[in-house]
Amino acid sequence: MTHAQEYKQKLVSAEEAVKCVKSGDDVEYSHFVAAPTYLDGFLAKRKDELKGVIVNCCTFPGLAQVAVCDPERDHFIYNNWHLSGGDRKLAEQGLCNYIPFLYHEMNDLYERHFEPDVFMVKVCPMDKDGYFNMGTSNSGQMSIAEKSKKIIVEVNNTMPYVYGGYGESIHIDKVDYIVESDNKPLMEVQPVEPNDADKTVANLIVNMLEDGSVIQLGIGGMPNAVGALLATSDLKNLGGHTEMLVDAYMLMIQAGVMNNRDKPFNRGRIPYTFSMGTKALYEWMDHNPMIASFPVGYCNSPYVLAQIDKLVSINNTIEIDLFGQAASESNGYRQITGTGGQFDYHFAAFKSKGGKGILCLRSTFTGKDGVMKSRIVPTLSPGTIVTTPRTVTQYVVTEYGAVNLKGKNTWQRAEALISVAHPDFRDALIKEAEKMKIWVAASKRV
């Protein structure tokens, strides 16, 4: 049988494909902007026929209909490895649960602990050799496919074809059902316009870098501001190795400051495991030999990352306490995003020869009451999740400066962090540090 004949044999409507889901099944969705947004709606329509179906995803683009359609959660129980804006709204309504994990362990988690019944994945059209390329997302998807009893591919013509790496494509032999979707464009994530504080932080970080640095940018406006500034800098021969491929990498390559020539491996290419960005980025990714899609178990492996000299990890954090504990995913017990790869890269950057792990944040924010509050606090509020432990935190950068916490004792950490807090809050932070016995008379007034 030819691949074309097999394709025709396995091609079904979306309504027909989702009939393979049974009550009590574990259904896995593909990740990020490659989530099966078309099939999701058809599965949701089967709500009254099903009971206790577990659906897992990672950063669904928009609102997952299997959660929206079932506010009592009798039919579908929706969970997520990393919350998108839509997932966060669902979580606040009690319609989405977070799954705590280290991102570099995702492949191992599926191989050891999961037996999915159905895997739904958005893909490119089949190539001449019978492969469906998974485009923007690699993540843990091949590990899910290898453990799943049934696989449904949702073909979307707007998905960019991305070279590997490995784990970037699935062969038709492994596919049970093929659904041709409505071909809606992938969700775009526009870069956040930086404010003056973001620009100051970005300048401080760029001044910490050197020629040949290998850059990882995390999710958020501030890392994107750094990438955009790097694209106009005088730095040379930068490299990229990242979990998330964003528009800033495209800008750096187009500007000629990033060529990936000095890396010990994957020279000339940027390994990544998922992408979220603009239509321009997705079009640039298509058949582009300068990028390579890898499973997250490779892209985020601390053992792989530690072998890259001058690895610089740049990630946002929401709040940091005077001990150096960084909270980047929750506000109290309210889950906002997820651990993601922040720990993986920040930990590995210190192991890298010449590497730097950088956490960046604006020193303040305005609360719902209209009052300015400090993001550097004496202690994290109750229920707040620590993303980067104090033992791992290296550089912290605000618009008031950059400090290195590695090797510092508790009073030295407090002194350093207070020095980059907003001036209006420094005296109060010193008083709290004194109460907490992490301030000494010899400490300088900051």
Image (cartoon, rainbow, N blue to C red):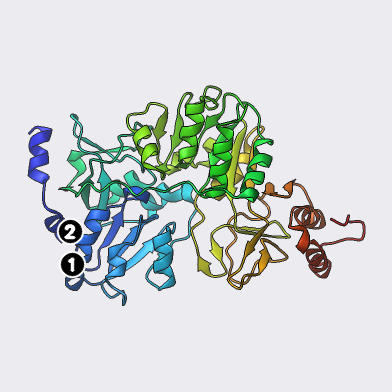
SS assignment at label 1: loop
Residue with the mark numbered 1: 46
Residue 193 image point, x, y percent = 53, 48
Specify whether 229 is left or right of 160. right
Vertical position of residue 335 compared to residue 389: above or below: below
Query: Is any part of residue 306 visible from this angle?
Result: no
Q: Answer whether labels 1 and 2 touch (C-beta < 8 Å).
A: yes
Residue 46 occupies which quadrant of the picture?
bottom left
Amino acid type, label 1: Arg
Q: In the rendering, which numbered label is found on residue 18?
A: 2
Vertical position of residue 419 compared to residue 265: above or below: below
SS assignment at label 2: helix
Crowd band around label 2 with a 10 angstrom C-alpha radius: few (<14), some (14–19), many (20+): many
Residue 123 image point, x, y percent = 26, 43
Residue 159 image point, x, y percent = 29, 41
Specify whether 428 is left or right of 396. right
